[in-house]
Amino acid sequence: MSDAGPSRLNGHSASHRNGQTQDRRSSGKRKLFSGVDEIFEKQSIEEKARLGREYREMQAEADDMKANQANITANDLAKHLTRQQALFDQVRDTGTAALDARLMLTTADTAFGLARKMKLDNNDFDVDDFIIKLKSCLGLDRPDMDNISEDEDEDQLDESLERASRRRVRDGPLGDWEKVGWMAAKYSRRVPGVEFMYGPLTIQHKKRQIGPRQRKKSLEPEVRPEEIQTQQKSKEDAKDTASLVKEVINVLRKTVPPGGTINYFRFVINPDDYSQTVENVFYTSFMVKEGHAGVRVLPNGEIILEHVNEDEQESQAEKVRNQAVVELDMDTWEEAKRLFNIKECVIPHRRHTTQVMTANGWYT
């Protein structure tokens, strides 16, 4: 059983490394595939049906063997595994391989039960044989002197006494247990030792030195830290995304007339702050989504931002919109500033106020 699983793995790994695999047996030999295309070629429906039918027959046999483990032998199990291995060599799809895995699980359970049965059979203990040998050691199988009939003649009595003097007879009605004890003593007899003594007898016990006790300090009353609401910010910090998008829309209206255009990078790039440039790209995307502006690419590759008229916003909503992900890393930001000679930002720089956390503050 232990060789069934590894043999399959080794066989399949070798076939993939060498570019060859094994097909169904014919005349006791396996067919080797010559190319990768032939290895991964799909089997025909008739071939899959035949393999499925044979696997179902073997599954029924395996279930019967598992239910009647008392009537099978190791040779029967080995023959069953050989047939299963020969059938597995023809499998080339996962559906049939699942049937093989189920069959292997049933066969493994049968092998486990058979091995456990063989182990129990080998450890059978014959109580009758043990009693016979024990009676022989105790002397209970020898004739008792008390059982000798008084009617025996003197010759038989003398012969019995002489035989009893040559060998010991049973001592009492329970036999010679002393003899059995000496037989067991050679396996358990040892010199008794004093196991509880691990050191000298005279030990000077050291007195425990108790140092001066420190007086416990009185606990001060507990004080809860001061609660500071982080939501209490300035008006500029309290602006949400919607208000910032409105600010960007107002900047576009003041900078670009309706229907006019501006270079996309000149509008969004803040030459003094890379993080605010990324924020400007984010707010501009919302402005384009709401239809206040549009992004176009000119034939020369320049990206421009167009201010959409209010009259055209309804028609813009009906047009098909294309979405794109704008990637603006630090190198692109530096290159755009140099290429378009951007010295000032169109969108005003936003100043964020930072709140200093005190040592005794409890922030929520």
Image (spheres, rainbow, N blue to C red):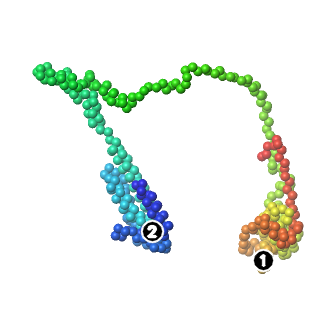
Camera sees residue 49:
no
Residue drawn where x is 84% and y is 62% of the image: 273
Between 307 and 15, the one nearer to me in the picture: 15
The amino acid beneath tag 1 is: Gly
Crowding at label 2, few (<14), some or many (≥20) Cα neighbours within 10 Å? many
Of the pair 27 and 228, the residue shown nearer to us: 27
Name the residue rendered at 37%, 32% in the picture.
187
Mark 2: amino acid:
Thr
User: Which label lies toward us, 1 or 2?
Assistant: 2
Q: Please state if 114 lies on the left or on the right of 319 as rendered.
A: left
Left or right, residue 24 beside residue 175: right
Residue drawn at point x = 86 percent, y = 54 percent: 353
- Where, by quadrant of the figure, is residue 255 drawn? bottom right
Residue 22: where, in percent of width, then height?
43, 68
**Residue under the image location 86 percent in, 69 percent down:** 342
Neighbours of disc 1 within 10 Å: few (<14), some (14-19), many (20+) = few
Res 140 → quadrant: top left
Q: Which mark is residue 21?
A: 2
The residue under label 1 is 301
**Residue 151, position as x, y percentages in the image:** 11, 20
Which of the pair 166/45 is nearer the observer? 166
Instruction: Indicate the position of residue 88 as horizontal and vertical percent values.
Output: 41, 64
Q: Is residue 244 above or below residue 207?
A: below
Residue 122: image x %, image y %? 33, 44
Q: Secondary structure at mark 1?
A: loop
Q: Is residue 306 above or below residue 65?
A: below
Q: Earlier in the sequence, mark 1 or mark 2?
A: 2
Q: Is residue 12 left or right of residue 320?
A: left
Disc 2 element? loop
**What is the CA distance from the residue labelled 1 to the residue labelled 2?**
55 Å
